Image: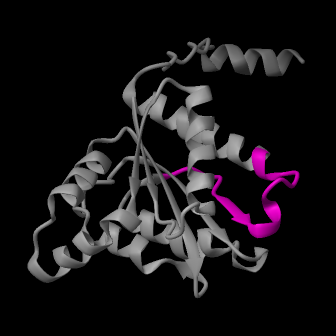
Amino acid sequence: MKLVVVSAGLSVPSSTRLLADRLAAAVGRQAPVEVEVVELRDLAVEIAHNFTNGFPGRRLAAALEAVTGADGVIAVTPVFTASYSGLFKSFFDVLDKDALAGKPVLIAATGGTARHSLVLEHALRPMFAYLRAVVVPTGVYAASEDWGAEGLEGRVEQAAGELAGLMQGLSGTGRREPEALPVVPFAEQLARLAAS
């Protein structure tokens, strides 16, 4: 299965990329995946050109194709002005509107303070719902004080497990047949009730 990680971190090193790598590694521990990372920082100029001329450059086209062909996506953005970064949003603006339909997506964000943690629910989740992605229930937000603190790894593992489960279920691998439930005729059920 192919897992594509979209990281919108701007600095090197980047806490956004660090979180993206931790999430990808956690998914890899729970399902066999081939990971490809798309660094939006490296595509910023091509994304801007795509807006002005309507055509993706070579590297942007490859990134868009990778996301479209993925079995699952991890999307991680830094928080700027209480929302996702403009670069992050621009990438998904140039992606084909049907590319994420039915695709499992894990959303995550990084920020300087825990006050921005609701960005997952008020900005990222609605955007991916609009794109008709299947967003895993657990999003992961990491504030500066979360690194090395108790709790972050648990959220990473929880979200990764949810993404791995969706990827396996949607790709058909690891899918179990539901157990057959015994069928008891209604008359027999009524007779049992009357006897008790």
Question: Where residue 92 appears, x then y in whole percent?
Answer: 34, 67
Q: Could you tell whether 195 is left or right of 73 in the image?
A: right
In this picture the colour scheme is one colour
Is residue 142 shown in magenta?
yes
Quadrant (top left, top right, bottom left, bottom right) of the C terminus: top right
Q: Could you tell whether 10 is left or right of 132 in the image?
A: right
Region in magenta: 135-153
Query: Which is more toward the observer, 96 or 28?
Result: 28
Q: Could you tell whether 128 is left or right of 29 in the image?
A: left
- Could you tell me which residue is drawn at 38 percent across and 53 percent down? 38
- Could you tell me which residue is drawn at 86 percent across and 55 percent down? 149
Quadrant (top left, top right, bottom left, bottom right) of the N terminus: top left
Is residue 124 shown in magenta?
no
Question: Where residue 34 appears, x then y in whole percent?
Answer: 42, 30
**Figure quadrant of residue 133:** bottom left
Q: Is residue 45 above or below residue 60?
A: below
- Could you tell me which residue is drawn at 54 percent across and 69 percent down? 11
Q: Is residue 29 above or below residue 46?
A: above
Query: Which is more toward the observer, 96 or 90?
Result: 90
Query: Which is more toward the observer, 100 or 142?
Result: 142
**Figure quadrant of residue 107:** bottom right
Q: Is residue 90 above or below residue 147?
A: below
Question: Where residue 173 appears, x then y in whole percent?
Answer: 43, 20
Extreme front residue here?
12
The number of numbered badges drawn on the structure is: 0
Extreme bottom residue here?
81
Query: Which is more toward the observer, 21 or 183?
Result: 21
